[in-house]
Amino acid sequence: MHRLLNILKDNKFSLIASLPANDYRLAQAAWDNGADAVKVHINVEHRASGTSFGSYAKERERLEKILEVSRGPVGIVAGGGPEPAERDIGKAVGAGFDFISIYAHHAALGLLEPGVTRMFAADYSYSMDEIRRLERYADILEASVIAPDNYGDRLNLRDLVKYGRLRDAVSIPVVIPTQKNIMPAEVQLLCEAGASAIMIGAIVAGKTADSYGRAAAAFRKAIDAIR
């Protein structure tokens, strides 16, 4: 356990792949092209990919296949609400997932039990004070702070300043998901703003193994070139 946390602390900047479907071929494409970690989903309607993910029981065979081909830490979004997350998180941790990922407002208090790395997400509605206090419970902050109306837009300077403010507010690693259409060349600026990783998803990587592999390779190359 805690492999992702160690990676984020040891690396200058890291690459996480958030899969748009629980498909081992997407996971293989991510690993083949330099991902440091992979994230899967259950119990959630995923806005960016337009995918509906079922319960752990419904997704189990696909999740086990992804774990089977993994070459690093694999995390799981536990759900889109406290009840399904609490129901299934024990099964996910027992299966060998390295970290859980969930919006703080979807996290049942049972998810605060020790033993697994917790990547809690804050959305655009969270105040800076809430984010500072969230650090008490999180190992990693997922900065999912872009309003849905702006999903897929190009990154701008105000976004960069917002990410920098979040980083200044906490002492734990900050992960930037690609809610916006972030370019590989922009990871240098995200690193300079203090982020620890980028988490690529459907907006920048598409939904096929080929497109996912190409995107992961491009971001890996840009990360390896960070000065």
Image (cartoon, rainbow, N blue to C red):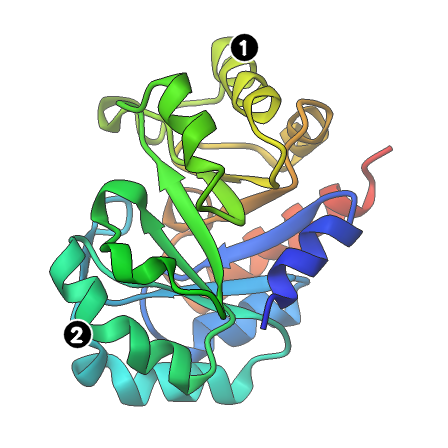
Residue lying farthest to the top in this orientation: 158
Q: Residues within 10 Å of mark 2 (few under 14, many from 20)?
A: some
Q: Nearer the viewer, residue 211 or 175?
A: 175
The residue tagged 1 is 157
The residue tagged 2 is 55
Q: Amino acid at mark 1?
A: Leu
Q: Amino acid at mark 2?
A: Ser
Give coordinates of residue 128: x percent, y percent: 41, 18
* SS label for mark 2: loop
- Asked if 216 appears above or below 90 in the picture, the reply is above
Q: Image quadrant for the C terminus?
A: top right
Sequence order check: which comes first, mark 1 or mark 2? 2
Say whether marks 1 and 2 touch (CB < 8 Å).
no
Name the side, left or right, on which 165 lies relative to 21: right
Name the side, left or right, on which 108 lies relative to 116: left
* SS label for mark 1: helix
Q: Which mark is residue 135?
A: none
Give coordinates of residue 21: x percent, y percent: 31, 66
